Image: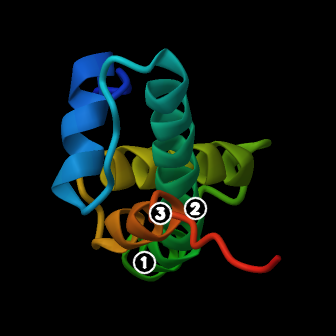
Amino acid sequence: MQIDMKPALAMPAAVDYAEGFGGKVNAQDPTAVKASLKNQKAALDFESMLLAPVLDSLQKTFGGSSGGSMVGASDYRQMATQALAQAFAARGGIGIAPIILRHLQSEKVQGGK
């Protein structure tokens, strides 16, 4: 099994992705596009961090022999689990990233004095 670890979003797709979840990004403003990409990365990273323990638990439960006799086997399993979680989140995951992105890119309310 080969996992495609290329970035899921290109620059124009970043604007479409953000707008698809209620975010408003001015494609002509490089600062806004950069902020949108930063928010998207944060949302995807957060979702993959949440997914990693779930996937690790599933792997331990259904993976059979953990290869405990091999030196470093648990480290490689953990790295594989993290890569799988990142790939899973980048392709849509369980829908947490869009919710976070919508919150991060909502218009800020100006108030006060």
Q: Earlier in the sequence, mark 3 or mark 2?
A: 2
Total label count?
3
Judging from the image, what secondary structure is the residue with disc 3 in? Answer: loop
Task: Quote the CA–CA distance across marks 3 and 1.
Answer: 38 Å
Question: Residue 6 in the image: x percent, y percent?
Answer: 35, 21
Amino acid under disc 2: Phe
Residue pictured at 25% horizontal, 62% vertical: 22
Question: Residue 8 in the image: x percent, y percent?
Answer: 30, 31
Vertical placement of residue 18 versus 104, above or below: above
Which quarter of the figure is the C terminus placed in? bottom right
**Residue 15 as seen in the image, left or right of residue 52:** left
The nearer-to-camera label among 3 and 2 is 3
Vertical placement of residue 81 versus 5, above or below: below
- Reading the image, the residue beneath label 2 is 46
Question: Residue 23 in the image: x percent, y percent?
Answer: 32, 55
- Reading the image, the residue beneath label 3 is 107
Res. 91 in view: no
Question: Residue 80 in the image: x percent, y percent?
Answer: 52, 45
Vertical placement of residue 47 versus 62, above or below: above
The nearer-to-camera label among 3 and 1 is 3
Vertical placement of residue 107 versus 36, above or below: below
Does the residue at mark 3 contact the one at mark 2 (Cβ under 8 Å)? no
Amino acid under disc 3: Glu
Binning the other alpha carbons within 10 Å of mark 1 as few (below 14), some (14 to 19) or many (20 upward) gives few
Task: Quote the CA–CA distance across marks 3 and 2.
Answer: 21 Å
Amino acid under disc 1: Leu
Task: Quote the CA–CA distance across marks 2 and 1.
Answer: 19 Å
Judging from the image, what secondary structure is the residue with disc 2 in? Answer: helix
